[in-house]
Image (cartoon, grey):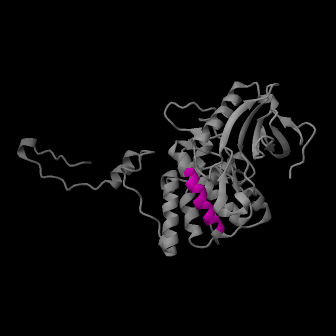
């Protein structure tokens, strides 16, 4: 439990908008705090995310809160449900969302290593939620243990929360921090450090946090930014992981996004194969055909090596004896 402080915007017992009775502070963030409250009309518990006072007059942050509200279009049990933004009479902006009763994976991380079988269940559940989000071109960008809650402590009821820095990749969408680094270094994909983010970054982050919870410790990336960047280019240490959990993490967390499992659907397919035949996941899956891997175009030299060449045709006299064979 987080202890309330005199400087907090709301205190337990406060009545917000004549409707929501504050019960406790759930968490403090860089730009907002989250409270647990109960509706005095319905009796339902809700979570209330309140923009800190110093940001309430900043249009960039109010737009960010409005964008987070739009995540309510994602309808899946593995994604927290948002309601709507409100403003108090004295100008404080807050966002209503479902209250998820259960421990976060950050709390489980502090308690020690988790069982691989439970982590595979969590992986399936979160991948299903990501699939729903990615289908609407929403990339979370900040998947970490503190942003996944196990409802009632049940791994099969994991819920993704806090889409506060999610990136809308729909054509023409406006983002606040869309072209800058956003996330946590420990779990961010290598390409995120340079501001490049798509659905594959969420896949990496999910794998990295699952590995951290298996170890019972967050990854150590170094003492300075240069070491962080260098270590991010290296494969994660999967020594000692059981099969097939080891293969899954290696496929999700390849430093090269082109070699990574490319979507939440791919992760679910991998898990299906493991469920049907645990040994099926030991060998890497074949690379997709070139016409499917369209996110990053390979350079010409690499493409030439992959393209089978036809034997050179014998030049005709009309062609002046010149060969038309490719170089």
Residue 292 point in image, percent of width and height: 39, 50
- Compared to residue 104, the image places residue 285 above or below, namely below
Numbered disc total: 0
For this orientation, the residue located farthest to the left is 317
Q: Is residue 163 visible?
A: no
- Compared to residue 314, the image places residue 40 above or below, namely above
Q: Can residue 19 be seen in this view?
A: yes
Residue 309 shown in magenta: no
Instruction: Write the residue at 77% across / 66% down.
Output: 112
| In this rendering, position of residue 86 left or right of residue 243 | right
Judged by its main secondary structure, the magenta piece is helix
Residue 257 point in image, percent of width and height: 52, 51
| In this rendering, position of residue 128 left or right of residue 213 | left
For this orientation, the residue located farthest to the front is 41
| In this rendering, position of residue 171 left or right of residue 195 | left
The answer to which of 36 and 227 lies nearer the viewer is 36
Q: Magenta segment, which residues?
A: 118-130
Residue 275 point in image, percent of width and height: 52, 71
The answer to which of 121 and 226 lies nearer the viewer is 121
| In this rendering, position of residue 215 left or right of residue 253 | right
The answer to which of 310 and 76 lies nearer the viewer is 76
Picture quadrant of residue 49: top right
Instruction: Write the residue at 68% across / 52% down.
Output: 144
Instruction: Write the residue at 60% across / 49% down.
Output: 190
């Amino acid at each position: 439990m987080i202890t309330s402080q005199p400087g907090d915007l709301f205190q337990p017992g406060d009545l917000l908008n004549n409707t929501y009775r504050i019960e406790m502070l759930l968490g403090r963030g860089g730009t907002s705090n989250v409270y647990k409250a109960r509706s005095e009309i319905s009796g339902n518990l809700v979570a209330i995310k309140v923009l800190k006072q110093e940001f309430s007059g900043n249009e960039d942050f109010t737009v960010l809160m409005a964008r987070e509200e739009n995540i309510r279009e994602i309808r899946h049990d593995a994604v927290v449900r948002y309601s709507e933004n409100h403003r108090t009479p004295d100008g404080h902006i807050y966002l209503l969302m479902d209250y998820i009763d259960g421990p976060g994976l950050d709390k489980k991380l502090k308690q020690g290593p988790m069982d691989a079988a439970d982590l595979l269940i969590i992986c399936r559940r979160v991948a299903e939620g990501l699939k729903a989000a990615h289908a609407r071109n929403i990339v979370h960008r900040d998947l970490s243990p503190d942003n996944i809650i196990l409802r009632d402590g049940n791994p099969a009821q994991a819920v993704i929360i806090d889409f506060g820095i999610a990136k809308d990749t729909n054509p023409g969408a406006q983002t606040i921090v869309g072209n800058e680094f956003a996330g946590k270094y420990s779990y961010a994909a290598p390409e995120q450090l340079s501001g490049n983010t798509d659905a594959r970054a969420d896949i990496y982050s999910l794998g990295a946090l699952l590995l951290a919870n298996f170890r019972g410790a967050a990854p150590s990336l170094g003492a300075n930014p240069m070491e962080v960047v260098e270590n991010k280019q290296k494969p994660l240490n999967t020594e000692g992981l059981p099969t097939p959990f080891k293969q899954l993490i290696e496929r999700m967390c390849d430093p090269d996004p082109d070699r990574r499992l490319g979507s939440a659907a791919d992760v679910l397919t991998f898990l299906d194969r493991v469920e049907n035949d645990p040994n099926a996941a030991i060998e890497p899956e074949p690379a997709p055909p070139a016409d499917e891997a369209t996110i990053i175009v390979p350079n010409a030299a690499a493409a030439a090596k992959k393209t089978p060449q036809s034997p050179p045709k014998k030049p005709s006299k009309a062609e002046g004896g010149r060969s038309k064979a490719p170089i």
